Image (spheres, helix red, strand yellow):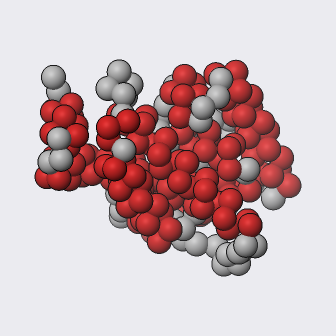
């Protein structure tokens, strides 16, 4: 039995310290998923907190035959989709582009030029992601940032593997069209996949 499983077993019996260790282990991936989906660090922090609260209160529904990370990221992405839908329902818009969260920045380099280029790339990636429909954005983030398999994504999004492949294909096509319309070069999107 690995350490994570021990923490989960203890947390299921009400051990809050053990669940705190789970939070420490997964706070980065949960926050990064929420940030990529919501494009707002404040909302991403709140979403991450809410995801952990929901996970803690639903630990009895977790199936140990599945990966815990998949289950936790599913809770996170579902909560983020709910927030996105609420945003659209009340017609909230954010007019100013938001800078990338510091946790998404890599190690500082000696020269400011590479940092500027990296910052611009991250802002461009975030703005491209914001153009996608929530289900496309979720699939892209889970596949290319969290490197989940098609099967894991399908399980999280409660759909089929072929539907996930289709969403990813359409998302890449849409990203290419947006990028070309904005004068960007294909494959220069910083996301690790080509159009």
Picture layout, residue 132 above or below residue 158: below
Which residue sits at x=39%, y=52%? 54
Residue 21 visible in the displayed image: no
Is residue 194 left or right of 152 when viewed as pictured?
Answer: right
Picture layout, residue 185 above or below residue 98: above
Which residue sits at x=73%, y=73%? 90
Tell me where residue 22 appears, x and y as whole percent.
24, 46
Which residue sits at x=68%, y=59%? 85
Picture layout, residue 183 above or below residue 95: above
Tell me where residue 162 appears, x and y as whole percent.
70, 21
- Considering the image in quadrants, where does the N terminus appear? top left
Tell me where residue 5 appears, x and y as whole percent.
21, 31
Q: Nearer the viewer, residue 26 or 183?
A: 26
- Considering the image in quadrants, where does the C terminus appear? top right
Count the numbered circles shown: 0
Q: Nearer the viewer, residue 55 or 171?
A: 55
Residue 18 visible in the displayed image: yes
Which residue sits at x=38%, y=61%? 49
């Amino acid at each position: 039995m690995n350490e994570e499983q021990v923490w989960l077993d203890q947390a299921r019996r009400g051990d809050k310290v053990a669940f705190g260790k789970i939070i420490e282990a997964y706070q980065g991936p949960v926050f990064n998923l929420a940030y990529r989906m919501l494009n707002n660090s404040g909302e991403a922090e709140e979403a991450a907190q809410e995801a952990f609260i929901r996970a803690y209160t639903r630990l009895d529904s977790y199936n140990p035959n599945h990966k815990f990370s998949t289950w936790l990221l599913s809770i996170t992405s579902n909560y983020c989709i709910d927030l996105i839908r609420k945003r659209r329902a009340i017609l909230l818009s954010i007019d100013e582009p938001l800078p990338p969260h510091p946790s998404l920045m890599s190690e500082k380099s000696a020269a400011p030029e590479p940092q500027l280029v990296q910052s611009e790339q991250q802002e461009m990636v975030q703005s491209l992601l914001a153009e996608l429909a929530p289900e496309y954005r979720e699939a892209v983030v889970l596949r290319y940032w969290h490197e989940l398999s098609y099967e894991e994504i399908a399980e999280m999004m409660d759909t089929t593997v072929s539907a996930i492949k289709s969403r990813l294909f359409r998302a890449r096509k849409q990203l290419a069209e947006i990028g070309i319309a904005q004068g960007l070069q294909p494959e220069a999107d910083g996301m690790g996949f080509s159009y």
